[in-house]
Image (spheres, grey):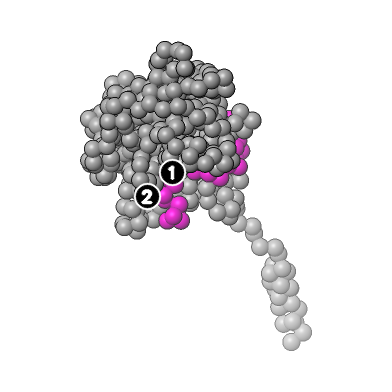
Amino acid sequence: MKKLVYILLPLFMSGFLFSQKKPIKKPKPIAKFNYIEEFKKISDEILVNGVAYNNLGELTKGVGIRFSGTSGYAKATEWAEKKLKEAGAENIWKQEVKVPIWMRGRESLQIKTDNGDWKNIRMLSFGNSEGTKGKDLVGDILLVNDVQELVNLTNAQVKDKIIFVNYPIDPKIINTVDAYLIAAKSKLLSASVIGKKGAKALIIRSLTTSHDDVPHAKQVYYEPDDKVRIPAMTIGVKSANELENLLKKQTVKAKINMTAESKGETINHNVIGEIPGKKDAKVIVLGAQLDSWDFAEGANDDGSGVVQCIEVLRAFKALGIENNHTIRVVLYANSENGGQGREAYAAYVKKKEEKHLLAFGTDSGGYTPKGFSLDMSPQRRQLFNPWKSYFLPYGVYDFEQTTAIQDIAPLKKLDIPLMELVVDTHRYFDYHHSTEDTFDKVNKRELHLGAAVMTQMIFMIDKNW
């Protein structure tokens, strides 16, 4: 027995000791992608082979003005279908959208002092504004510079006056988009508010950061209970300041003649193209407005966004990237004069109960990219923290903003996370909604770099969400 114990004991001990050894560590999983390299591939492809700038030239100079409800917009939809197909979109379709037909017609504004002659002032009527039926509308101009002043004025003081508001974008606000939105939402710029006081018409200083005499358009919003819808128009900065100086010294009359009129509705289309997902049918949507104002090429607003969205699809195809989820581009109808296109797409998503991972918008011009505005829950915003270092070499660092642009905004009601490309907008409102928003104002390098970082972000969302 002792002999047997001596024989078994070493075997037992060796097994015991062997069992006490630390388990072998499993190797750490190797990352599927080297994101630094993937970002470089995307950037190289777009900065060397990108076609966004050429496409923008075709859209602005070839198609040209593409106001909703016109043949120009119909031409733009044909162009967009063609470009989506060239970019590699596998499914392309058009979505019907009811839009208003509004014709600007002839328009003029003249002013004169008591002893002076009539002087022409360059102007633009608000989009959807009522006209004067081609008749002269004459009245004394009353200057109003702040909301409290307007509130304090009695209806008798305002009655039959033509109200002039010389309300500038606040230069102290560094973010020009914020400055614009604050000014644009002022009651001073509301034709309905002014009209309810008994005024004949509204003239405003253009919402622009420029100091020239170019008028910049704005859309009018009449309230349903407005008994009278008064004409509304905008004038350039120089004319606005000169008019205020005149009014401080003497009475000034205005003579307005506008043939603007609304002619019901017609059908335009959102243009949609996508690359179906290889893993599932969840959608990452990119959106931009296809229309422009009726006098403008709309190069920065928003031709740049249109061609950048299309470039994302082209880059995915050119690099052979197999997307997990469906990547879709929606080019919206009538963003400028009503917003029916964005509402139609949101209604479509709700009806179809499509799962959207993200809605990405770009509508601030083809300027140097600086970051991404994340309009989503704080928890989801935190998911971007590990990615920030990948974007930094491309000059992209701002992930702090939390407001999305108007064309994707309706999707927020469906609990879809929103994202917007943040660019350097210091020049954007020099040209916004004016005849100066032309192709020559867009820099190819900036435009393509914006498309590159958009593609990089869509790549990260597609591979990690």
Q: Is residue 234 above or below residue 249?
A: below
Q: Which residue range is magenta in the image?
A: 388-416
Q: Is residue 129 left or right of residue 186?
A: left
State the SS at label 1.
helix
Which mark is drawn over residue 157? none
In magenta segment, residue 105: no
- Residue 352 image position (x, y, % from top left): 31, 57
User: Residue 285: x, y in percent?
Assistant: 39, 45
Q: Assess whether mark 1 and mark 2 are in contact (beta carbons under 8 angstroms).
A: no
Residue under numbered circle 2: 225
Query: What is the count of numbered marks?
Result: 2
Residue at the image position 40 percent from the left and 19 percent from the top: 110
Q: Nearer the viewer, residue 125 or 273?
A: 125
Q: Residue at x 70, y 63 (%)?
A: 22
User: In this rendering, does residue 424 appear at all?
Assistant: no
**In front of the other: 314 or 125:** 125
Residue 196 numbered mark, or none: 1
Specify the amino acid type for callout 1. Answer: Lys
Q: Is residue 56 above or below residue 391?
A: above
Residue at (71, 75) in percent of width and height = 12
Q: Quadrant of the N terminus?
A: bottom right
Foreground of the two, 313 or 38: 313
Q: Residue furthest bottom?
A: 1
Residue at x 44%, y 30% (from the top left corner): 162
- Quick one: label 2 or label 1, which is nearer the N terminus? 1
Using the rendered image of the protein, determine whether residue 125 is visible from the camera's viewpoint.
yes
